[in-house]
Amino acid sequence: MAKMWAGRTDGGVDSLADDYNSSIRFDSRMYKQDITGSIAHAAMLSAKGIITDAEADQIIDGLTGILSDIDNGSLKIDLTCEDIHMFVEQTLTERIGDAGKKLHTARSRNDQVALDVRMYLREECDRISDLVRKLTIAVVEKAEEYKTAIMPGYTHLQRAQPIVFGHHLLAYAWMLTRDLDRLADCRSRINLSPIGCCALAGTTYNTDRRMEAERLDFEGVIPNSLDGVSDRDFCIELASALSILMTHLSRFSEEIILWSSWEFRFIELSDSYTTGSSIMPQKKNPDMAELTRGKTGRVYGDLITLLTVMKGLPLAYNKDMQEDKEAIFDACDTVKMCVGVFTGMIESMRANTEEMLKAARGGFMAATDLADYLVCRGLPFRSAYKISGQIVAECIRRGEVLETLPIDIYRSYSELFEPDLYEVIDLKACVERRISEGGTSVTSVEKQISEIKGILL
């Protein structure tokens, strides 16, 4: 098949090299954006008198028909074409004749592909944001369900202080709200039009870039033509935002994997989001969480690919930049799948509140409150800290917990202890005394839930 760019060369390319050079296998997913952009371009050419109104009508009708035929399956994308842009233009010319050859006036594939990618990723940002919003709502609703369920809070994966499960879940909800902010911020920089930059230097035709941008719902145009065709910051920025999102999902996955283990038994995942073993019938594996944790590395790899492709490129366009699409498309596809599955997994997750409470009691969670009890009675904190540590060691030797250790044992360490200390070290009381803003008290958790719902709904 003759190449539409044949001229300086005869267009004859070795078959292996031709396949190597082709991008239609992965850029064909942008056919709607390519056709929509071309319709806007034809309208602009007509408005500026560069082509006639009749020619523009022919082109627009032809493009509309191609879009409809691809959508309904009557037109198959020819994978022997070099890219989706050439396929659309070639099909248009076959259908309407010479008028189709005028579509590419005052345009290059360089600004055309930059336009298509921006339009596509703009929509992907919206799709991913919708999925993240649904996941965040699922996490918030689960936090509301378990806003009074006491569990151990950890540092260094060692039991540290009592918190409520809802508070723990809300930490992830807040992370996800930041992910939404990053996606929205990234989208604003995606939403600038490069069309009209042409190959690199603009064009001699009296075009109207802003008209095209407005028709395509862009917020403005990229002011420098070199930058317009060679910028892929927006791909890198989106991949970075998606990588951070996957970091959050991976951390959450790790905790879900731990919590659902027999050693913790804090949660139980629905059978719909677990698998069995091929040999061990007792197993209930948290495969969806594990896959999410694993796929995080894949998205990181896509980000590194984009950074590496762009790091040494001179201005303006270079063929290396064709590698942007597979990486950013894969990152988007992977994130959408992970977030979608994760939402169902969280919605159907059940907490074993008794196991959580048992673990909190067995971990001497109230040791800090015990020290604070002595401080409130005049003992310096470091002295109170030491006595509390000694009492924990005493509990371990006796097989007791702080709540069951007799008062006479407490008083053997300090005469400041009185029977009211049991009210202070009650785990529910420990939680409720965390009254500082953002703390784990039920009132604080309810306030956070209200704040996040205000952001999302």
Image: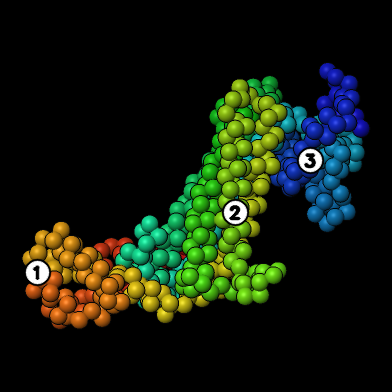
Q: Name the secondary structure under disc 1.
A: loop
Compare residues 17 and 28 and report the one nearer the observer.
Answer: 17
Return the x and y of residue 108 as percentages of the image width and height.
72, 29
What's the amino acid at mark 1?
A: Arg
Farthest residue toward the top?
8
Q: In this view, does 76 lie above or below 396?
A: above
Separation of marks 3 and 1 at Cα, in angstroms:
76 Å
Compare residues 277 and 165 and report the one nearer the observer.
Answer: 277
Q: Can residue 1 be seen in this view?
A: yes
Tell me if mark 3 has few (under 14), some (14-19) or many (20+) residues whose alpha carbon lies within 10 angstroms of its own.
many
What's the amino acid at mark 3?
A: Ile
Compare marks 2 and 3 and give the one earlier in the sequence. 3
Residue contact at pointers 3 and 1, CB within 8 angstroms: no
Residue contact at pointers 1 and 2, CB within 8 angstroms: no
Q: In which quarter of the image is residue 412?
A: bottom left
Q: Quadrant of residue 348?
A: bottom right
- Give the side of residue 20 with respect to residue 177, left or right: right
- The residue drawn where x is 84% and y is 46% is 77
Q: Name the residue under label 2.
A: 294
Separation of marks 2 and 3 at Cα, in angstroms:
29 Å
- Give the side of residue 90 with respect to residue 434, left or right: right
Tell me if mark 1 has few (under 14), some (14-19) or many (20+) residues whose alpha carbon lies within 10 angstroms of its own.
few
On-image quarter of the N terminus: top right
Q: Is residue 287 above or below residue 325?
A: below
Q: Name the residue under label 3.
A: 24
